[in-house]
Each structure stands twice: as C-alpha cells, then as structure tokens.
Image (cartoon, rainbow, N blue to C red):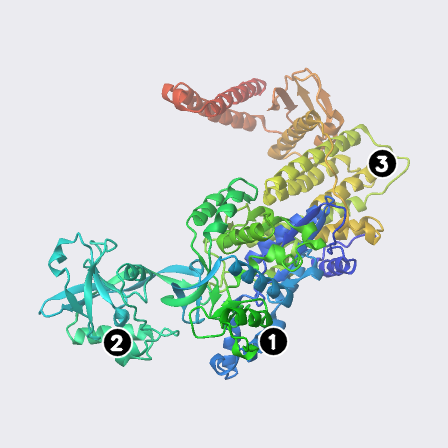
Amino acid sequence: MQISDKYNPQETEQKWYSYWLENNYFHSEPNEKPPYTVVIPPPNVTGILHMGHMLNNTIQDVLVRRARMQGFNACWVPGTDHASIATEAKVVAKLKEDGISKSEITREEFLKHAWEWTDKYGGTILEQLKKLGASCDWERTRFTMEPKLSKQVIKSFVDLFNKGLIYRGYRMVNWDPEAKTNISDEEVIFKEQNGKLYFLKYKIEGTEEFLSVATTRPETIFGDTAVCVNPNDERYTHLKGKKVIVPIANRVIPIIEDDYVDIEFGTGALKITPAHDTNDYEIGQRHHLPMIDSLDDDGNLNQHGLHYNGKNRFEVRKLIAKELEEKGLLLKAEDYVNKIGTSERTGAIIEPKISQQWFLKMSEMAKPALDVVMNDEVKFHPEKFKNTYRHWMENIRDWNISRQLWWGQQIPAYYFGEGENDFVVAETIEEALTLAKEKSQISNLEISDLKQDEDALDTWFSSWLWPISVFDGMLEPENKDINYYYPTSDLVTGPDIIFFWVARMIMAGLEYRKEVPFKNVYFTGIVRDKQRRKMSKSLGNSPDPIELIEKYGADGVRVGILLSSAAGNDLLFDEDLMLQGRNFATKIWNAYKLIQGWKKDETTKPNHSDHQAIEWFRNQMDKTIVEIGDQFEKFRISDALHLVYKMIWDDFCSWYLEAIKPNFGAPIAPQVYDQTISFFEELMKLLHPFMPFLSEELWQNISERTPENALVISQQRKAETFNNELIKDFETSKEIISGVRNYRQSKGISPRESVEIFTNAETISNEELVKKLANISDIHFSQKTDKPSFTFLVGATEVSIPLSENIDLAEEKGKTEKELQHLKGFLMSVQKKLSNDKFMAGAPQNVVDIELKKQKDTQEKIALLEEKLKTL
C-alpha cells in the first residue's frame, strides 16, 4: 500500500502500541530461551514523567527490545514505589485542604485516605511510559505496598532481627520537622546559607569575668550542658575545673576540655548541646554529659525554652538575639556563611535530634557487597563509579530503617510491657502473642495486650528487595519465576541512588539468594539545561516529556535524548536534538517512499554498478552490525545509535539508493528492488529498539504480516563475515566521486554536465559505479592531460578533470596561486616544528607521526598545484 506523503506519529504510535498489547508481545513466561531480565527502578507512585525518567526508561526499552530481537526471553518488570515521605506529605496536605489534621484521626483512617490517594493518582507515570513506547510486561506490574510485597518486607525484617542484625537504640538522627520523621544521612542535602555568627557571654561562676562563645544557633542555649575548650589552648588554662552560667537559662554548666575543639574557630570555646548537634552528642558521650532536648517534633521550643515555649526555632533565633543584646549578653554578631542540612524530600532544615530508632547493622553485609563490585561480578558502566561505591562501602554506618510515618510497612515489633526489652518481633500478631507469652512467662496474655510499634520502615527497606520481591522470591524461594529470571541482567539507574538502592540491592541479593541481583549496572547522567542546571519543576527549566512526544513523536524524542547521552555523563538537553530525531524519521519515511515509487520490470536486468553497490552494502551492514554489538557490550548506547543513524542516513540513503536508483521514469530490475527491500527490512530490525513505532509501521507496510511476523518479535540479522578490503575500496570510490562533485560545486558546473577524468592509476575499483554517481563520460587510466585541469589526490591516486571551457582561466590561476601560497606557509610551520630538537625529543611518537604525515600530504598537494599552474 502506498504510504502517505508525511509520517504521522500520533496516529501510528497509538495504533501499534495497542497492537503490541493485544498480541501480548511484552509478556514473558519462563521457557527454554535464555532469559533477559530488567526490573524498573520503581518511580514514586504519585509521580509524573520527567526528563530523567524519559532518559532512563528509553535506555531500558532499547536494551529490552534488542534482547527480544536477539533471541532472548525478555522480561521487563514495571512497578511503582510507595514513597513514604513524599506520599504521606501529599496526603497530609490534601487532608489539610479538607480541614482534617493527621493528629486528629487514627492510623487506620489515615491509611484509608492514603490508599484512596494512591488509587486516584498512582500509576499515572506508568501510563505515560506507554506513550514513550516502553515494552514492559504490564501483567507483572508490582507496587511496593501491595500485600505480597509488604509480606516479603516484613519477613526480611523478622529474619534479620532473628539473626541479630537489626537492633533498637537511641541515636542522633536527622529530624525533618515538616515531615515529622527522621531521615537517613543520604537524604540530607547540604546547602550554603547566609546567617550570623553570634558571640555570647557566658559568665564564669563566682566572678565578674565571662567567657565568649560563638554560635550560629543561639536558640539552642536551653539545651547547653557544657562549654568546651581545647586542652592545648593556653588562653583558657586558668579556667580548668570552673563553671559558667548559661545566658537567659541561668543554669550552671561545667567547662570541659576536648581535642575536638578547633582553637582557630570563633573564640576557641564551644557550647555543647548534646541533644541538638551530632558532634556535641559525641563529646557529650565521652564526657558523660546530661542531655536536654529543648525542641519538639515541629521544630518549636518546648518547656526547657522557658518564655519561648511553643515558638518556632527560627523566630526564637531573632527574638533571643534581641534579648541577649538588651541584657548585655551579646558581644557581637557577624555575617557568616555556613552549610546547613536540608531534607531531600521536603526542603526543611534538618534538626539533629536524639531518638530511639531501629537500625540494621551494615558492616557484615557491606564486605561481600563491596567485593562483588570490585572483582566485576557486578560490572559498573562507566567504571569510574566503582571508586564512589568503594568509598561509601568502606565508611558505611548502620542503616536507620525506622521512620515516624504511617504510610509504609509498619515495624513488626509488638510491646507487651513497659520495660526496655518488653517486646517481640514476629510476622503476624498471632505469632507475636505466642512469643510474648514465652518471653514474659505470662500465659494469659491476649492480643489486645500487645501494642505494635508505631513506626513505618524506610521506603528503601522495601525497594532493596525489589529484584527478589517482584518474583515473590522471599515467599517462595524456589518458585519457577525467581529461579528463571533471577539474577536479573542489567540495571539502568542514576548515580544519585548508588547507595540508597544499588548497594543495598546487592547486599539483599547476597543475603537472601547468595547471588548478585544483576550482572551490569548502567549509570545514566543527570539531565541538565544549556546552563548546566539540573532540570527540575521548581526551577521551571524542565519541559514536559508528554508535550515533547506530542510535538516530535515518541521516536523523535527517543532518538533526541539518546544522541546526547553518553553513560554516566550529564546530558545537556537541547530541543534541537528532538528536531534531529524527527528529521531522521522523515528521512527514513522518504527513503521508503522513494523505493515504493520505483516500477519493477522483468525485462530489466541488474547492471554492473548495481552488483557493486549491493555487494558493498551487504558487507558494510555486516561490519556495522559487529560494531553495534561491540558498543552494546560496552553499554555505549548513544554510540550504537550513532552507528545505526550513519548506516541509514549516509550508507543507505546517500550512497546505496543513489547507486541503484533507476533513471527518471525508467524501471528497476526486480532482483535489485527485492534486494533493496530486504536490506531495508534488516535496517528496520536494527532501528526498532531505538524507533519502535516508525519501524513497525514501515515493516507492516512492506508486506502483509501475521501477528507471528510482527517486527517487535522478529530476529535481528546476525553479522556474517565481511570483506574489509571491499569496504575500503568503496571508501576510495566515494572519495573520487566526492572529489568530482566538489569540482562541479566549486566551479558552478551542473551535475548533469558529464566530465572526463585522467588518472595515474591503472584501474579503480567500482568503475561503473564511479562513472554513474560522478557522471563521468570517460576515465583515462595511466594518463596525464596537458589541458588546464582541476586535480585532487585520493591516497596515491591522482585524479585530474580538464577544466570546462566556461571557466575563467585567469581567475582560476589567481585562486591556485593563493592556495599554493597558503600551503607553503603551512608547510613551513610544520617543518619548523619537526626541526625543533626539543619537540622531537619530548613529543610522543604518535604526535610526531601526525606531523610527518601533514608534511608529506602538504608536499604532495603543493606538487599537484604547481603542475596545475603550468597547464594554466
């Protein structure tokens, strides 16, 4: 069927995606084929598609579609993450709009609202991925809070607790006053902020003297339990054993000594607030200082803050500075820039806080997980991320896995008494009751006597099981899916979650399957704008991917985003690349339209130039297929696309089609037409992983296809041996053709005007093809011409074209002399460099070789131009 003049992505994309789904091409079941498994980095259930997702999922889809076409049983498991903090924050905000406060309702009521929210907004992003062409096995879609996955999370908690790897303890945590939960160190983003450094007067007890102490947070003085100086600081030797009075609070606290204090910073005297600073906490532990927690969970001062009770920490900072000044207790305040920790999710300034939390011991699990990456059992692409990974794993701290949230898996610890140890850990409350009876020796305990821990587990504690839990591997360790699909093949993710997710999945895989969870990790770069800023909704510099798809077509967007995306390097987003992707689609469409317009005629036979073009393109394709495979092996997806792009645009459209194209109105030999269609089909197979919609549309147009013959499941051509000499010969032929075309262009001569050429060569490869594509009437081998001529070199082959009679010889002579002068100047600069002993002794051999080649090439060009001048 004759295709339309223009490619319409909108019509095509919907049609073929529906067709693929109807025929179940994306669904996978274990079979005799080798598996190729990818699990999606689960996006937030309430999220929408952004440019990072676009890049990440395009790469995954390219890998999955290619594997399917290479004979693998490809399985791409989609799903979403419940995203505790982000989702809970949205639900709390929604309730607030409805006049409901989280503190006024029960956990059960809150969870009902959270599930309603999830059902309404969850999964939007998965629907958007379909517009991109993602070939996920949608029947296998999972959600980290669905019952079966939650059960596996709880099972792993109980197992690790029973192994002595999970414990409960008081620790300094990062408190997010907005989300009202602690967060991990990795979720804290440090930002520079302009503030003040306040110099406060701490009166020395029993004297009129005072000690000056510098702080950026005067509101925390209500939690001070000591002032600390460095034992080597001679300024304070006389204060050893003395005490000071805390300003406003009027409490008496000791002066202590510790090497931690920097003599150069501030006044060299440090106020110690163990409940509100990580380093102060460590000092407090060493010196057995009491802890006074003067802030509540909202970041407001509590009863320890005296008359500031109930006021926000930042409001108090301004008010207390004023009060200190009025009471003569503020020496001075200076402008100061410091780095403050903020919550990755809410942006709130983090408050260090002592809290009882659940922790998972990391040191035992980290060692084997480090080894498998260092010895390349799990390969990182690019490799540079191994160092980042090693540094983190060697300095790992215990993982704080509890969060003060309701949306998430509730910690399966059940309390039966008031004592520190009066709890049991179990998968169900029924099992907990049995354990509690044993532990307490109270036989008449009832379920109503048990109280489950209020905290939920960190979101990452569910997603670290993802490659196992999506196949229910924690529930049925020997089920057919986990045994077939695990370990997965490749993971595509961003380097920003190398610790949150990648490292922890490796630990979980080794712990529960005694096997790594994936063989390769491909780290994408971060998508940035032209000013190198990270794309984000808050900056307003991120285009809507769906709008881009509507504007350029999904294939155009896929190509555009991949063309600029080298592994691990940041991608500078440029909408022009999307335009390039769309233009590429148009080029392919027009190429097929051109072929379709040719008429076959049984009486027409292939000529010699047809055979030459066919032979060359077959070999060129096989060579390129080998190169594409090599780039995929190295996870250089962008480079693989560049090879496909060049083969279609340059090799096929610019050279092959021109070589076999019949004269206007003339028919084409059926054998040549059929071979061309066969080549085009192979190109569509190679293109399909990158541009699935366009390639399927053209494939289905070429001939009637049954569902068994759809492009999406067809097999790519395996490279056969290719003749490299034949390919090199063709490159020489192309240079001769280009040389003749350049002559025409530079002299303003019509391509229709045939020329004759003289050459020193005895023969040239692909003679018929060269004559056709360069419109040469005659080739004079091993001959020179006395006529004024345009001469160029292709390797050692000299080609001369007698100048057209229409050319102004005086003007040509002037141009030649000017070019000769330029070349002689260039030759002098090269020879100067080569005669420099310092350069010759110090430069690497390959650099010297380049300069020697420049000298030889320039000398040959000068000789040609001097010959030309004689004829002129």
Q: Is 741 above or below relative to 502?
A: above
**CA distance separating discs 1 and 3:** 63 Å
Residue drawn at x 69%, y 53% as measured from the top left:
75
Tag 2, which secondary structure? helix
Q: Which is nearer the N-term, disc 2 or disc 3?
A: 2
Q: Where in the figure is residue 500, as x and y percent of width and height?
A: 50, 56
To which residue does mark 3 refer?
A: 671
To which residue does mark 1 refer?
A: 116
To which residue does mark 2 refer?
A: 319
Query: Quarter-wise, where is residue 378 in the image?
Result: top right
Tag 3, which secondary structure? helix
Query: Quarter-wise, where is residue 309 in the image?
Result: bottom left
Q: Where in the figure is residue 424, as x and y percent of width and height?
A: 51, 68
Q: Residues within 10 Å of mark 3 (few under 14, many from 20)?
A: some
Residue drawn at x 70%, y 31% as measured from the top left:
774
Q: Is 726 above or below relative to 399?
A: above
Is 424 on the left-hand or right-hand side of 764?
left
Amino acid at dot 1: Glu
Q: How many marks?
A: 3
Amino acid at dot 2: Leu
Is 402 on the left-hand or right-hand side of 773?
left
Query: Quarter-wise, where is residue 419 in the image?
Result: bottom left
**CA distance separating discs 1 and 2:** 43 Å
> Which residue sits furthest left?
208
Amino acid at dot 3: Gln
Q: Nearer the viewer, mark 2 or mark 3?
A: 2
Q: Which is nearer the N-term, disc 1 or disc 2?
A: 1
Q: Which is nearer the N-term, disc 1 or disc 3?
A: 1
